[in-house]
Amino acid sequence: MTEHFRGFQELADEPPEAPPPEGAVEAVTAARFKLERWSEITFEPRGEWLIKKVLPRRGLAAIYGKPGSFKSFVALHIGLSVALGRPWASRRVAQGAVVYIAAEGAGGLRKRKAGYVEDWRDLPAEVDLALVSAAPNLGAAPGDLAALIAAVETAGIKPVMIVVDTVAKTIGAADENGTGMTAFVGNAGALAQHFDCLVLAVHHVGLGEDAQKRMRGHSSLHGALDAQILCDRREGENSTTLTLQKLKDDVSDVKLSARLTRVVVGVDEDGEEATTLVVDEVVETDAPATEQRARIVPRSQRLLSDIIVAAIDDAGEAVRPFGLDGPPVRAVSDEIIRSRLYAAIAEKASPDDDPDKVAERQRKAFSRSIADLLKAKTFTARDIKGRRMLWLP
Amino acid sequence: MNYCIPNLAVAHDALTSPNCSAILTEILECALVTIEPRIHAELFGLGVRWRGVIGEDFFGALRLEAIVAADDGKFEFAKYDMSGRPAARAFLFGCYDRLSDLADIAAWQPEADTIRLLQGSVAMLGEHLIDIPRVAPLQVFSSPLQWLRADRAGVYIIDPRRAAAMLEFHTVAAADEPAGRALRAQLAPFTRRLPKILIPAEKSGD
């Protein structure tokens, strides 16, 4: 897992620095907490999402649902998409290593992997997804947190996502409605912080009739989540609805549908087919209707359009852009249009305007508006004998 | 040169951003060097081969234009410049951003082997390559000339601050150990999570 690329080796770490001189301890301690001044507080929008507008790059998220709601299937599909860098639900994915903690037992995951190998013919032999088949105790502080971190680091993996399947199995005998859950939240947060990654917890719905659309156990989990997805299987169908109920710092109105397909992965001792389900596709459903916006033509485009039409009318010439056998069209050179537009902008300029700024306005208005008009197919252009000619299509 | 702009625009999926039309217009006004044998020979003399000259598509092909340097690492076309700053020849080509939108124009001046951008919209040359699946690590080149010589198969970092965030979940390769250390030093101030940096493996010696 550490090395997929033949002929390469990882760049060695920098040699350790010499221990700080006497008296420098205070300075080192102060450096643990770096203060950023206002001008230094920056935001990089491009590093925000693991799956765009679904899962953030770092933090804690949960996918939950009733038993049999396909939540583990979806979690594995998310993990595979991240490991492969493939879009998920047509959304951009940041590629990286994934660790999947199959605390409910690894048998199901092994079968699902065989399903994907069978179904996705282009699946590479090595995928950056590693399995932990034992259930770590994350329901106590610190529990197995250090051992889990050590296991991942020893394997040389720098995960961008760790899937914990399920919360209940990693809490163990601890109290899901109290200290056990708060310890889990603390451990999962520490795990995410240590690897600077996202921890995706797979969890169950509440036990009561009125708790089927909220997570089981102590509310500290809900409060700590950066994203929360409810998995709701459609009765009798191999498909499930994914409702993004919570997404930190953003409005969430996303509803997705995951469709699963049955795949034969082998034959057992009795000659019967062994099958599993793989997620076939995840698509957006029930998207809120967006009002059709009227197309607004910018003023600069309208001005240029008027100038071109007038120029074709009074200064146009007949050309045959498609060869001698093609039809003639009445076209005008873009130089004529440029000079007329420049004149129109100069006319509108105030006498106090800086001439350089007026010239810049003229240049930008021409280059941008003409490209927009051509892109919108309002006009057609072609180079004819060294001149760019424009005409109405 | 005989082209139809609307057809090109419609055929090319990348031309979707609002900024794109301005870039498109500007770049189409520059002279393509691919049809100029003398310039072509000059580039070949520098080790830039055919693929480095023509790029991936029409917009990426090298073009020739006079530019003036702006103070902020950007450039302006000499034909539009009113400042009276000295003009210099540069090879221009369109740059795609991470989402594969045609986002900027880069001006490469081979004499100093420097890159300037028209708008500063991209952080790397080859930025559109960083998220595509690959069978080899993403190569990071330490100069624009090296990038062109390698047929643009990788990236050259222009803005380390933004590049650090974009590369933090990637595995990248440098030409050798000094280049790898230089890359690490370039990105480290801007990220807590450096990309995994690979270098060519040492020969076993047998």
Image (spheres, rainbow, N blue to C red):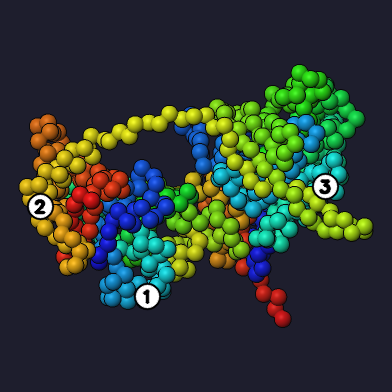
Chain ID at mark 2: A
Image quarter in which the N terminus of chain A is found: bottom right
Which numbered tag is attached to residue A327? none
The image shows residue B4 at horizontal and vertical percentages of 27, 59
- Residue A163 appears anywhere in the view: no
The residue carrying mark 2 is: A316
Q: Secondary structure at mark 3?
A: helix
Q: Residue at x 31, y 70 (%)?
A: B34
2 vs 3, front mark: 2
> Do callouts 2 and 3 mark residues in contact (Cβ within 8 Å)?
no
- Residue found farthest to the top: A210
Identity, as a three-letter code, of the amino acid under mark 1: Phe
The residue carrying mark 1 is: B44
- Residue found farthest to the left: A314
Image quadrant assignment for residue B17: top left
Tell whether A141 sits left or right of A235.
right
3 vs 1, front mark: 3
Which numbered tag is attached to residue A108? 3
The image shows residue A313 at horizontal and vertical percentages of 10, 47
Q: Residue at x 34, y 53 (%)?
A: B9
Identity, as a three-letter code, of the amino acid under mark 3: Gly
**Nearer to me, A213 or A56:** A213
Above or below residue A160? Residue A221 is: above
**Nearer to me, A229 or B19:** A229
Chain ID at mark 1: B
**Nearer to me, A137 or A64:** A64
1 vs 2, front mark: 2
- Residue B135 appears anywhere in the view: yes
Q: Residue at x 67, y 74 (%)?
A: B203
The image shows residue B136 at horizontal and vertical percentages of 60, 64
Tell whether A68 sits left or right of B38.
right
